[in-house]
Amino acid sequence: MKTELAKIDPLHMDEKAMEHAGRLIAEGELVAFPTETVYGLGGDALHPEAAKKIYAAKGRPSDNPLIVHIAEFSDLERIAKEVPEQARKLADAFWPGPLTMIVWKNDSVPYATTGGMDTVAVRMPNHPVALELIRKSGCLIAAPSANTSGRPSPTEAAHVAEDLEGKIAMILDGGPVKIGIESTIVDLTEKTPMILRPGYITPQMLSEVLGEPVEIDPGIIAADDTRKPKAPGMKYKHYAPKADLVLVDGAKDAVIAKINELAGEKKKAGKKVAVIATEETRNAYQADVILCIGSRMDEDSIAQHLYKILRDCDELEVDAIYSESFVTPRIGQAIMNRLLKAAGHQVIHV
């Protein structure tokens, strides 16, 4: 299959290209598109065959649910068995935006889209190209990240092409994304709202809007959770570079010393080593490659650069990667969730 590529200016969209992309979705084809979080791989959410194509293109386990992307709140009412009052409050506060809500599905949503679950994950993306694609297609769009399953998520169109060229019909290139990590997922089918994946919208923000506590699922940080996943990213190793990644956590000086010690051992064995560091520490390391992820004073920059840095490690063909941990005040949990998944929960505490 030849994959078409269309450059789309989000502020001055090419009407013809968007109509064509919408038609492809309506005809059951797959189109990759930008959102504010990462690039998504879209297909008709209510068409089982489109969902199967998404799983096949990504090499994604079929019990890993897809998120349904909508353009209007009324679309949620079309696919939910009932819309809880909590969903209305959260939508008013955070949609369009990087928040996915899980509700009970109705019969219009095929099990192929929900990974066999009776619940459906739904979000309204905050990106003009994504919203226009949904509207032009006349469909609700199921869209996981547009990458090969398990690899770092794509934050620019070139990452999508690297993984999915020849496997999908079209890529809409809207430039680099703004946030760089996937949406927060909150489950509204439990007695207490439950975060299943941390993201830019924090538990504190959700709790403030709802006026009630919000819990965090222990499966977010558990390395050996074997339950059927209710949301993307809960069960399988994700976001991983090709080389072995190890996180080193602790006080700054101890982390620097430990990473330099480990890097030195690998280099003696003839291995090419990369270190993921910050602006504040980048000059303290001795390794073949030092990759700066951003400043600890700007945690948004760390999130934005995370997946690109992991992909850079693949391009540089390193044999081992050591990374600092990033326990930042607001979205540190979301950043560490992605890094822990990428490292297969390999952490050294110093």
Image (spheres, rainbow, N blue to C red):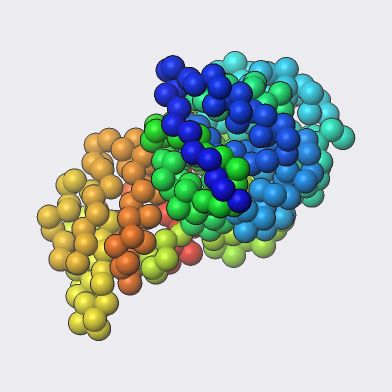
- Residue 218 x %, y %: 58, 51
Q: Nearer the viewer, residue 117 or 330?
A: 117
Viewed as shown, does residue 76 lie left or right of 125? Answer: right
In-front residue for pair 67/344: 67
Farthest-out residue, left? 283
Quick check: 260 above or below 307?
below
Location of residue 225 in the rendering, given as x and y in whole percent from the top left corner: 62, 61
Counting every numbered tag in the picture gives: 0
Q: What residue is drawn where x is 84% and y is 33%?
A: 108
Quarter of the image where one finds residue 11? top left
Residue 127 is at least partly visible in this image: yes
- Res 222 → quadrant: bottom right
Which residue extends farthest bottom? Answer: 269
Q: Quadrant of residue 193?
A: top right
| Left/right of residue 272 with respect to residue 153 in the rendered view | left
Percent coordinates x, y for residue 110 in the rendering: 81, 41
The quadrant of the picture occupied by the C terminus is bottom left
Q: Residue at x 73, y 35 (%)?
A: 27
For the question of whether residue 265 can be seen, the reply is no
Viewer-closest of 119 and 239 = 239
Q: Residue at x 52, y 51 (%)?
A: 165
| On screen, residue 286 above or below 182 | below
Give the farthest residue toward the right. 107
**Residue 267 at x, y = what percent?**
21, 77
Taking the spot 42% from the left edge, 61% from the top edge, the residue there is 241
Q: In this picture, is 113 found above or below 325? A: above
